[in-house]
Image (cartoon, helix red, strand yellow):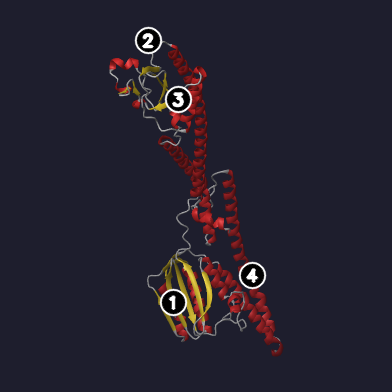
Amino acid sequence: MSQLGRLRDRWLPGSIVARMSLVLFVGILVAQTLGAALWARQVADDEHRRLIEVSENLGARVGQTLQFFSRLPAQYRHVVLDQLRDMGGTRFFVSVNRQSIALNQLPPTQRSDEASRVIQAQLQAQTGPLDDLSVQFVAFEQLKILSGDNLMVDLPLRWKRFALVNPGDQSPVVVIQHRLNNDEWIYVAAVLPVGEAIQGSQWMTPERLWSLGLVSFTVLVLTTALVRWIVRPLRLLARQADALGRGQTPELILEQGSDEMVSTIRAFNVMGLRTHKFIADRERLFASISHDLKTPLTRARLRAEMLPPAQGEPLIRDLENLDVMVKGALQMMKEGAIHENAEPVELEPLLSQCLQSATVAGVPSSLSCDPDLVIHGRRLALERVFANLIDNAVHYGRSIDVTARDADGSIEVCFKDRGPGLSDELKTRVFDPYFRANHNPSTIHVGLGMGIVRSLIQQHGGTIELLDRTGGGLVVRLLLPLSHFDTNGNVEAQPQA
């Protein structure tokens, strides 16, 4: 596996539901974020275009106002201003002051600088080049008027009709001041209609974040429910496949879900039935072989006994070996496919019972086992495994020491003898059928025992390992899971009608 694959498996959740939900959630979140960014970009472009249009229009109108007052005789300026105020015009606030008013400007931005340049360009397009011209952006609450000591928001009620209308948002006020002569400055103030564009759009606002999170969360919940509904038959299939791998007869799974899932479940049901039928046919076949071989072997032995000893005795020995091998093969088939239910098995009493054969044979033996060790397995199969290993130690070794202990969720059982041991090559070949190190087949040891042991250990989900013992001898180490036959809960399956 590549480094990228290992990192992916390390950081991603284990279940398919969690993985699909996470991938979809991240994908939706990224898509919504990119969509929001694209939308914000379009909004920003629209705001910029509107800002330029409004600035051009505002600059043109203010330019006309400046041109009008600059040409108006000084003695009529205040008269015209009073008439304009009496008419209630509130789009512009115009006054003629003795000096320029110092204002608290808003922090400059790229857009405010651009709007200021557009307004000045439109002004000068109407009036020609102007000296002592200033364009400033001020918050409505900070707008100073008249002598500079008054704020527009502080005007008395009777003056409100002369003032600008409060925009009620973040729109700033554009203030243009221009020197008419040595003693007079014209002051024009107007609310910029798209003033919020001056500061730039805050596209990732708390409201948008909440909206983005709620939509993503809703999609995540719906996606998780959908994936769980789709994967549910797959979980049932996995449990039944696990039961089949543990040597149990799986139940037929109800065909449900998508078309692909129904086809998969149907194929698994057919496979389970075929596998069960194959095992049953194989057992019947070997039972028939056992029965059918008895008569010809007996007849051949009788005929061999009628021959002269020099010719009959070798033939009789061959027939005896053949009979032992056939019985051993049948025993292997029988013991390698034990049909019994799993149950809690206490190891200490079982090992003590199996060690009685060593006591009867007069071989030194010992047992070290925690009395609380319990394994969920098949009692008869475990008894045959332990008895076979103890019998080998009694036959080939000079003693047998058995230890059993808890090993991080598994049970380690070791059988130690003081026999001649095995070479590395023989440790792998000892599991082959009919293999016996430096011995011919006999009625006691045929060479199938270790193969049967490994088969039964594998049925329990365990492993077997042959090691050298310090000081001479052999150690057979078994590692068995505590609950191999527990398929993680009841399988929610129903037989097919």
Mark 2 lies on residue: 75
On the image, the x and y values in percent for residue 228 come to 49, 46
Name the secondary structure under disc 2.
Answer: helix
* Vertical relation: 13 (above or below) 450: above
Q: Nearer the viewer, residue 469 or 411?
A: 469
Q: Indicate the quadrant where residue 201 lies.
A: top left
Q: Which mark is residue 289?
A: 4
Residue under label 1, please give it.
Answer: 403
Q: Amino acid at mark 1?
A: Thr
Q: Nearer the viewer, mark 1 or mark 3?
A: 3
Query: Residue sitting at 50 percent across and 30 percent down?
Result: 43
- Identity, as a three-letter code, of the amino acid under mark 2: Gln
Q: Where does residue 341 sit, x and y in percent of width and height? A: 47, 63
3D distance between C-alphas at marks 2 and 1: 120 Å
Asked if the residues shown at circle 2 and circle 1 are in contact, with their CB atoms under 8 angstroms apart, the answer is no
- Residue 250 visible at all: no
